[in-house]
Image (spheres, rainbow, N blue to C red):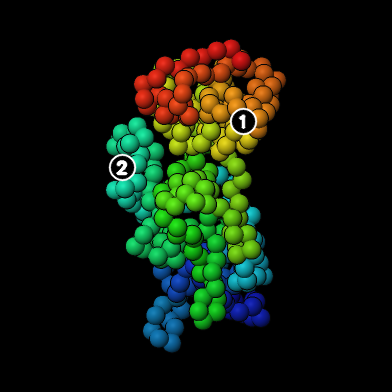
Amino acid sequence: MQAEHRYPEEKFIPVKPWRPCPICGKGDWCGFNSFIASCMRVREGSFKEVVLSNGQVAYLHWLEPGMVNLPALMKDDSITAAQTAPVEVRDRVYRDFLRLLYLQPRHREDLLRRGLTEWEIRRNGYRSVPETEAPWSVCRRLIRMGHDLAGIPGFYKARGPRGGTYWTFDRQPGYFIPVRDEKGRIQALQRRMDDARGGKYKLFSGHKSRGGCSCGTPAHVTRPAKVEDRRIWITEGPLKADIACKYLGAVVVGALSAATWRPAIPAILALEAKEVIIAFDRDVESNPEVARAYLTLKVELKKHGLAVSRAVWSDKKGIDDALAAGMEVRVVRA
Ligand SMILES: [Zn+2]
């Protein structure tokens, strides 16, 4: 009853997709201040109903002290870089994001050609960057599902034609490859680009000056349907790891590149591995940079008390190609 009198100086602000209603989680129609939410959808738990001038009923809910930080939310109208969200949150958003997308036939063909089956393609969750629906529309659907895109790498804000901002993401054609942690959570997305001129693989990340954030260089952990080899394999590239995993029947860790192996270490330790096999591309023998990465990785693994071996095969470049071609892969002590 005293609600309106207790804090008369604080105005209600309308909810927005980037600051949704604290009661129903939607980004339109409702409003709130630091103490009260005026929700148009949820009656349960409200302390008062107010009939608005247009005849609609708003349900007033008390908010927990500190639940809403109004000055911070107001500031969110401007575009600032976001703090990267915890992996649980990223996983939830990316799962729903990928569910809203499809895999284009040409991308499915590419994955089949590389040795994956239809079932594995579905299980691993590859999806094409949307080609018909606009990115802002996909973002709006995610926000309506209750997700906050701030802190989710790959998403960033664009300025609207009439002021204000909206969430969006890059739409260059290609397909998404989920980068999972040791618990199977999607921590980041990598893209296989159709136009490889700027690099075949690109992370879904960045645009810090436009409200986006970075995903860092996480290592991908992929598990076979059935583990037949208890050793952990390390290769370069999440997709390569997915393909190798299927042939090896082992958990494979895919570093984003030979040089960015460091995030693979905590993943391997969390997996409680005893033996690790390094299966970097064959240019480890000719490329000094890859050779150096291989050596430092080997030393680091041994420091943690792990037995380290190296995979060798003939002529093809990556272990995924070698395995898919039915080539013999030998394991030698490193
Ligand atoms: Zn509401």
Give the class, few, some or many, for how many residues have Cα within 10 Å of label 2's Cα (few <14, many ≥20).
few
Residue 204 visible in image: no
> Mark 2 belongs to which amino acid?
Glu
Could you tell whether 255 is left or right of 41 in the image? Answer: right
Looking at the rendered image, the quarter that the C terminus falls into is top right
Could you tell whether 307 is left or right of 245 in the image? Answer: right
Looking at the rendered image, the quarter that the N terminus falls into is bottom right
Percent position of residue 213, x then y: 60, 55
Q: Which mark is residue 287?
A: 1
Q: Please, is residue 264 above or below residue 89 in the view?
A: above
Residue at (46%, 33%) from the top-left corner? 240
Q: Nearest the camera: 164 or 127?
A: 127
> Mark 1 belongs to which amino acid?
Asn
**Residue 265: quarter of image:** top right
Q: Secondary structure at mark 1?
A: loop
Q: How far apart, in angstroms, are the residues tagged by discs 1 and 2?
A: 31 Å
Q: Which mark is residue 109?
A: 2
Could you tell whether 300 is left or right of 141 in the image? Answer: right
Q: Secondary structure at mark 2?
A: helix
Asked if the residue under mark 2 is in contact with the one under mark 1, i.e. CB atoms within 8 Å, the reply is no
Q: Please, is residue 101 above or below residue 311 in the view?
A: below
**Residue 64: quarter of image:** bottom right
Percent position of residue 235, x then y: 53, 29
Numbered disc total: 2
Query: Disc 1 vs disc 2: which is toward the camera?
Result: 1
Percent position of residue 28, x then y: 45, 72
